[in-house]
Structures are given as C-alpha cells and as structure tokens.
Amino acid sequence: MLPVVALVGRPNVGKSTLYNALTKTRDALVSNLPGVTRDRLFGICRRGERPFMVCDTAGLTQGEDELARGMAAQSWQAIEESDLVGLVVDARDGVHPDDLEIAQKIRSHGKRMVLIVNKMDGVDENVALAEFSRLGIAPQHHIAASHYQGLDELTESLLGLLPASEAEEEDHDAIRIAIIGRPNVGKSTLVNRLIGEDRVLAIDLPGTTRDAVRVPLERDGKRYVLIDTAGIRRKARVGEGLEKFSVIKALQAMEAAQVVVLMLDAQQGFADQDAHILGEVLRSGRALVLAINKWDGLSTRERTQVTSRLDWGLGFVDFAKRVPISALHGSGLGELLKAVHQAHKAGTREFSATELTKTINEAFEKHQPPLVRGRTAKMRYAHQGGRNPPRVIIHGSRLASLPDSYKRYLEGFLRQKFRLTGTPIVLEFREGENPYAGKRNELTERQVKKRRRLMQHVKR
C-alpha cells in the first residue's frame, strides 16, 4: 500500500488547490467559496522519487448542522487512516483560533504533522515563520499552491517523513463504474452499501456530492473502481456556478468509466431529466445498467405501475438491463454487479472479421435492404473498429442509401447473434471510391481520326 498524506485545515485555505498541484490533476473542485470539498478525495503524487497518496478533505468548521457534522466526520476519518497529516493554513489570515484547535485535536490522535503555510505570494517569509511558530509544529513549509511555488521542497520533505513502501500501480483489471443520476436518488448511499462503510457523505439533502469521488472495491475476488458523482439537474435549475463544475465532473466521470449505472428513483418515476441523462450516456457510448432504487418501499400495485411507466419511457434503451434495488438496505446489489459484468463483457468484446462478415451476410440474406432507384446495397466485408462501445465497420457499395430502419435491424441482429446486452453498438458504413471518378479517358491519335471520319459521315 502507498503511504497516505491527509491535507486538513479550515475551509478555503487552499487544500484542494494543493491537492491538484501535487497530483497534477484537476480532480478536486476549486473555488473562492468555502465548503466546496465535502468528501474525501484520493490521488497519487508522483512528483518525488517514489509515489504516495494524497487525501483532500473538507474544511473543519464549528457548524452544528447535519451537513457540517458529516463533513467533519469524513475529515477526521481521513486523519485516522493517514500516515502523515499536513495542516494547511492561510499565510494572509495569520494564525486563526480554529488553527490552534485543529492542531490540538490532531495531536490528541497521535498523528505526526507538518505545517503547510499556503498563499505565501506577497507575504514576508520571516513574518510568516514567526507568526505560525505559535502552533508548535515542525517542519514548517511555505508554499503558494496556485503558482506551484515550494512544491518540490514540500514533496521531498513529505517523502522523508513517510514510511517506505513499494509503489502501487493503478489496477487496470478493475472495472470502472460511474454511478450517475438526478440529485438525491441514492448514489452515495449505494457506494457506501457496496463497500460496507461510510466512505462518502450520504444524507437526505440534494446536492451533497460535488466532486467525482473514486472508491476502490474488491468483492468476490473481483476488483472495481466506483465513481460517485454529483446529481445532474436541468440547466434551468443549475444556478450556482460551482454546481456547473460538479455536473462537468459527473460527465467527465462518465467518459472515464467503462460501465455507467444510472440510478432512477422508483418512487418518483421516470422524469424528463432522466431522459436527458440517458442521452448523455448514449453519446458517450458507454455500457449501461439501470438501477431502480427504493424499490422496497413500493406495494405490488405500485410496482406494476412503475414497471409500465418505465417500459414506456425507456423503450429507446431496451438493450440496458433494469435491476430493482434498495441502496439503503442492500437488496438487489448482487444482481446489479452481475448486470455490470455482463454489460462490461459485451462492451469490451473482441470480434474477428470473419464472424462479423458472416453475420452481416446472414442478416442481408434474411432480410434484403429496400431498392433505391432499382438497385440495392451490397456488402463486401465487415470488421471491428473499436471497443466500448463495439464499433462495426461495414464495407460495400450503395450503403449510403440504407434507411435508418434497416440500420436498426442490423444492430438488433448483431445484438441477438452475439448476446450484446447492456452496450450500444456503433455501425459505420464505408463505400469504396470509384477509381475513375473525375477522370477523362484521353483518346489516342487513331481514335481521334476515326471520330472525325464518323462525324463527317453524320454531317452528310
């Protein structure tokens, strides 16, 4: 395992900015507004001689509401799991009473600390050194994370304090699963239930999750990476600028995933926003599983009505498997992971050119394409052009004349033949160019003389 450094401190001192600078990513949301980060966010810092994990945490505040308590619990859990704590403070604000209290609580946990004085640009270093010596934390590092100042020295110092360990590379065999949906449909609850702990903040309040949080999971000998995302609302309702970035993070997580689990609220039914999110999934081309959450709270009559509405609203994604679950109580999660494996296998399957050509020929023989100007399309051969989603390239002549209905027929034939459940199929048609197009046949001298004689004969 890689050693872990937890970045903690008051809100808006630059923890997320420092996290992005150390990991060389933009995974953590950054804003001038306090309280942007709410969940623990892990990344790998590779700036030094050996890598280590960096954990971005929520700002520690004195709030008494449920959200503030949940954020603080996430931060203190990160401190417990870390090998080293980096207390981040703001050089421009000086020593804040909350800094003194946080430092004292970290000491009570018996964790080793380093002091990271951020936003040093424009601040006298000697003044900052004297000011923050009151905290009694050594070593003390002066940086400006937004300008990448002092990061090399900070990284070298952190490596000197961390226990030695072998670098742990990213598990490429793990299935990446993005869990998306409207706000408050139970995405974070599902993640916590799958891993068996309160890994991400999950309360009955829409908009709790903001970052796209990646959580590794190993279950029944199989590895996964769960990506919890922010709820996607209609554009008209996304008023806060910060929420727009959260939605972008959710869409980026969808692109990075191999399988997308779209969560629907069975008690609220299929809404227009669900159709919009499904459109984004189809544009991404990712394998899809539909998780119908809160199914346990419905009566038999209500389940029949919900199933009927879903049949009507989800007709355009009939290839995706629907799994009724209860994220809160854990029912249906085994079937959900089976559907994820089935969709992942279908989306990443490899085909030989021989079997694709044979299947497309069989489809043409069973149902001929319609005639266009007395002529029909011809298919020569087919081959695979990509995976996730499977892309089938069909070569032939007059393929541009194929109607959309016939293309859907070919897609359905391929899906039934190879049992491709849970993944869209992309068909690409290519026609061979006419080698004589745009070229004029030059006559020989003998042909020119013959043409003249014929023209003279015609004129008579």
Image (spheres, grey):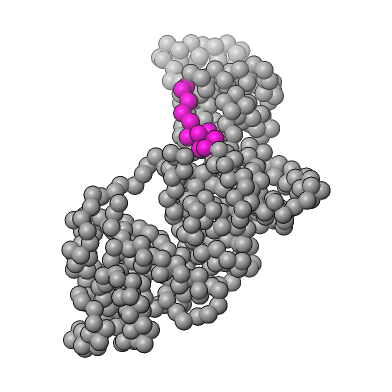
Q: Is residue 351 magenta?
A: yes
Find residue 85 and report its horizontal and vertical position in percent.
30, 69
**Residue at the spot 42% in from the left edge and 63% down from the top edge:** 40
436, 102: nearer the viewer:
102
Residue 337 falls in image quadrant: top right
Residue 14 falls in image quadrant: bottom left
Relative to residue 243, is residue 147 drawn left or right? left
Q: With respect to residue 302, does 240 lie above or below?
A: below
Q: With respect to residue 155, does 418 lie above or below?
A: above
**Residue at the spot 57% in from the left edge and 11% down from the top edge:** 457
**Residue at the spot 54% in from the left edge and 47% down from the top edge:** 260
Q: Is residue 227 magenta?
A: no
Picture quarter with the C terminus: top right
Relative to residue 372, is residue 20 drawn left or right? left
Q: Which residues are magenta?
A: 341-353
Magenta stretch, main secondary structure class: helix
